[in-house]
Amino acid sequence: MLLPLFAIALLFCATVITGAPGRLRVRDDELLQDVITWDEYSFMINGTRLYVFSGEVHPYRMPVQSLHLDIFQKIKSAGLNAVSFYTFWGIHEPKKGEISFEGFRDVQVFIDAAKEAGLYLIARPGPYINAETTAGGFPGWGTYDPALWRTSNTSYVESYQLYFDSLTTIVAENEVAKGGPIILIQSENEYSGFEAPYHEDKVYEHDLINTIRANGVTIPITTNDASQGGIYTIVDVWGFDSYPVDFDCSTPYTWASDAVPETFFEGHLSINPQEPNVIYEHQGGAFDGWGGSGYNSCSILTGPDFQRVFYKNAVAMAITYQNLYMIYGGTNWGGIAHPGVYTSYDYGAAIAEDRTLREKYYDLKLQTNFYKVSPALLTSRPDNYGETAGAFTNNTALETSQSIDAVGNLTGFYTIRQANASSFEAINYTISLPTSLGTFDIPVLGGSLTLSGKDSKIHVTDYEAGSTTLLYSTAEIMTWATFDERDVIVLYGNAGELHETAILFDSTPFNATLTTTGTSDVTSDILDDVALVLQYTTDGQTVVEVGSGILLYILDRTMAYEFWVLHPPAPEKGSYANYSTDNPVIIKGGYFLRSISIDGGTLNILGDLNATADFEIIGPSNITEVTFNGASLDTQSTSYGTLQTGSVEPDLPDINLPDLSALTWKTANSLPEILSNYSDDLWTVANHTKTVNKQRLYTPVVLISGDYGYHTGNHLWRAHFNATGTETGFAVDVWGGDAFGFSVWLDDTFLGSWEGDAVHSSYVASFSFPDTLDEGSEHIITILQDHMGYEEDGTAASDDFKTVRGITSYNFTGSADTEVSVWKLTGNLGGESYIDTTRGPLNEGGLYGERQGWHLPGFDDSDWDNGSPLDGIDAPGVSFYRTTFDLDVPSGVDYPLAIVVSNSTDNPYYRSQFYVNGYQFGKYINSIGPQTSFPVPQGILDYGGTNTLAISLWAHGAEGASLNSLALELRATVASSMAEVENQPFTPWSPRPGAY
Ligand code: IPT
C-alpha cells in the first residue's frame, strides 16, 4: 500500500522526568543518601523516576540456593524490576539467643543472585511477617514469652533485638546506597487490626525504625497497611496491600461485581499525598488451604484477565509501585506452613512452584514493559475518579478512568473496564478522547471497539515513543524502542478486535511509503492534515512501515506473548550494570529468554525452549549475527529490516525415571512407643504447673508442647497411671491446628483416632476401653498428634500465635479419681536444640523414625524388613519406608519432577510425609487433600546420583492404610540455559547419641 504522507518529525522529545530528591523523615528531613529518593509521584533511582514493578519471593520457600538465579531471571525477563522478600525469624533464631544463617538460611546468597539478575530488592524482615508461615514468622519460643508480642513490651522488644539487628545489618551492607540491590526496607507487616483495649503502639513503631537506622540502614523505610487505613504512617513511605478477589479459589471464574477498588487515589490523598501511591502487596495469586480447590483454580481466579483488570486499575489511580504477592510462591517444605496452607505454596502465581511459566506470566510481560517505557505514567494524575461510569463512552456498562500526565506533555491514559467486574459480556463501544488536536470520536474511520468480559485496556493519547507521537491508540502498547533513528512500536489487542492508532506529524504535506507485511488488513486516512490514522484488526502479526522512521508491530495477544525486551549488561555503570535499561533488543520467539549480551555485531541470547523456535531480532542494524545458547543461527533480513533467524530444535532427551512402586523398599515400625518394652525415660516430663498461655487449662500440669520447647511436626504424649478399676474410657481435648489429627492407645491397644478435617483446629474425642482394668494395674495412654504449625498473629497485639498445641483437658470416663502419675512428651529430637542444622529447625518432627534420623540418606536399613508403602500396614500405627534410586538427567535441561500420589478410598484415613534426601518435601493427608502432586526441585533431588526417599505412613483407622499409588513424574521438559544447579547439602545420617 502506498500513501503520500507528511515528513516525519519530532513533536515532543521523549524525556525521562527527573525530580528533586525526596526527603527521609527520620532525621529531620536530612537526606541520609541520595540514590533512592521519592516525591509525591514516584520513587527515583539516582534522580530517574522508576515504575517499581516488583514480585514477592521468599528465600526460605526455595531451599535450593543455586535456583534463586533462575527464578530471578524469569522475573526480570517478565519485565519486572524488583523483588520483595520476607525473612523468617523463626528459622534464623529457633533457640533464643542463637542465630544461624547456615545453608539455605544464608540470605546473602539470595541477595547476590538478585543483583546478578539485575533486580532491586525490597527487604521485609518483620519481625512479624505473616506470610502463611508458622507463627507468622515468630520463633516457637515466643509462644511462652510472657510479653504481649507486637507491642513495646520490653520482653518482646528484647526478644527481637538479636534477630532484627542481624537482619537489618545485612540490609545495611547490601543497600543500594552502598552498591547492593536493596532499595527499601519494610518495618513490621500489616501492623493493624488492634483488638481493644490495645491500639497502635507508637513506641514499638519508633523502636523498629530506630533499630533499623541504628544498624546503618539509610534507604527509605516503608510499611504496608492491610488496607488504606493510615496506620504506622511515621515511616518514610507508607503504603498498603490489596487482595481484591480474596482467597476462595473454589469459584475461580467469579469475582464480586464490585471487586475493582475505586478509592486508591482518594485514600492516598487523605493519608500521604506527599509520598508516592504504593501497593506493597498486590494480589498475584491466592493461598489455598487444607481441603481447598488446588492451585490450578487459584491461578484461574487470578489469571491474565485478573492481572489486566486489577493492575491497570491501580495504574489508573496513580499507583507507581506494585509488588505482586506472589510472583513465585515455592514450597512449604518441612514445618514452614501455618495451619491454613498445605505443602505447596504455588499460590497460582505467574511462575509456578516447579518454575514453569503460566500464561499469566506472558500476559504480565505485556503490562510491565509498557510501564517501563511510559515515563509520563509516573507523573500522571487521575482526573475523573468517582465519575468513571459511562465516562468518555456514554455507556454505563463501561468505566473509563482518565489519568493525565501532570508534569510532562499532557499524555493521557484512559483505562477502560467493565462496570460489572464479573461480566463475561463483550461490549462494543466508541470513545471520545480529548487530544492535543481536539476531541475525536474513536474509531474515526467507522466501526466500533470491543471490550471483552473481564478485560481492561489502557488507551493512550499524545503518547511519546521516541520521536513519534501517537495522537491516540486503542491497541495497547507493549513496548517501543528507537533503533538507528527508527521508532519501533509494538501494539497488541485481542485476536479479531478492531483498533485504531493515529500518529501525529508536525508538517504537511509529505511523501512516505506505508508498507504492510502480515495478516491484518490495515486501512488508513489523514486526520486534520497532521495525523495518520490506521485502522486494523489485531490478528497474528502485521508489520507496518511508515516511511523510514516508524515501524509498527500490530499483534494479537498470543503473538505478543512471544515478544521479549532484553537489555545487555552495561559494565560502564559499575554496580548498576545489571539494572540498565539502555540498548534494548526486542526479540520474538522462545518459551523463555533469559538474558542477552552483545559482542560487536553478534547478539548472544540465552534462553530455554520447550519446542522448536525461531527468532526475530528487532534491534540495532549493526547486529548481524545471532547465537542461541552458544550455537550460531542462520539469519536473514526481513523486508522491513529486522533479522529473522533459522529455527532451533531443543534437545529434549528422554530420561529414565524409576518406577517407585517397583523399587525395593525397606520398612520399620515407627511407633514402638506403644510397646511394653519401650522406655520413655529420656522424654521430657511435663511438670510445669504454670504457663503464660492465656488458654484455660483443665489439666493438673501444663500439656502445651511449646512450653517444653517442641514447636513443629508430630508430637507424642504419654500418661502413666494406676487404674482404679472403674475406668471405662478416656476423653481428651487435643489442639493441633486445622486438619490435624490424633490417635490414642491404651498400652498397645488402639483406642481410636480423630482423623481430622479441614475446619477443626482442636477436637474433643472420647474412646472406650475394650476391657475393664485391674485395680492398681499400671498403664500408659499414648497420644500421637499432628502439629500443623502455629497460628499466625495477624491481628496485632492478639498473641494468636500462642494458641495451644497440645492438650487442654482430659478425663477417665467412669473414674474421676484416676490420677496420672506422670505426663511425658516428645517432639523433634532436641527440641529447640534441634539436630539437623543443615535442613533447619522445622524439617524434623517427633515421629520415632524422625527422631532416629531414618529419613536421612546413609541410614543403614539393611536389617529392616522388605515392605513398600503401597502395601502399607494392616493396623493403626506409623510405619516408615525407605528406598533409593538413581537419576541420570543430563545437563542442559530443566526437567522438574514431582512425587505424585493418588487418593485412596479404601481405608482413607492416613497421613504421609515424604522425605527426599532428608528434606521433608510433602505432607499428604489422604482424607482432606487437595494436594497429590508434590514438586521436588533439582538440588533436593540429585539429578546425577543416588537419591534417598523416605516415607512415613500414619494409619488412623483399625484397618491400617497404604498408599494407593506412588510415582515420580516429569512435570515439564525444557531445554535450559540455567546455571548449573548445585545440590543442597545432603548431610547424611550420623549416630544420634541419646535418641529415644
Ligand atoms: C497479607 C500478608 O501481609 C502476607 O504476609 C500474606 O499473608 C498475604 O496476606 C496472604 O497471602 S495480609 C492481607 C490478606 C490483608
Image: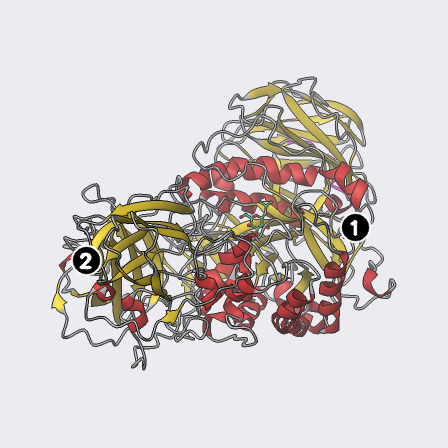
Q: Nearer the viewer, residue 361 or 647?
A: 361
User: Does residue 305 sit above or below 56 in this rendering?
Assistant: above
Identify residue for label 2: 774
- Farthest residue, direction left: 866
Mark 2 or mark 1, which is nearer the start of the sequence?
1
Assess disc 1: are there few (<14), some (14-19) or many (≥20) residues with their C-alpha within 10 Å of its C-alpha.
many
Q: Helix, strand or loop at disc 2?
A: loop
For badge 2, the amino acid type reads Asp
Give x and y (percent) for residue 538: 53, 31
Q: Is residue 134 above or below residue 856?
A: above
Type of residue at label 1? Glu
Residue 20 screen position, x and y as percent: 85, 57
Q: How many marks?
A: 2
Q: CA distance from mark 1 to mark 2?
A: 76 Å
Residue identified by numbered label 1: 275
Q: Principal SS element in the magenta part?
A: loop
* Residues in magenta, as a range: 3-15
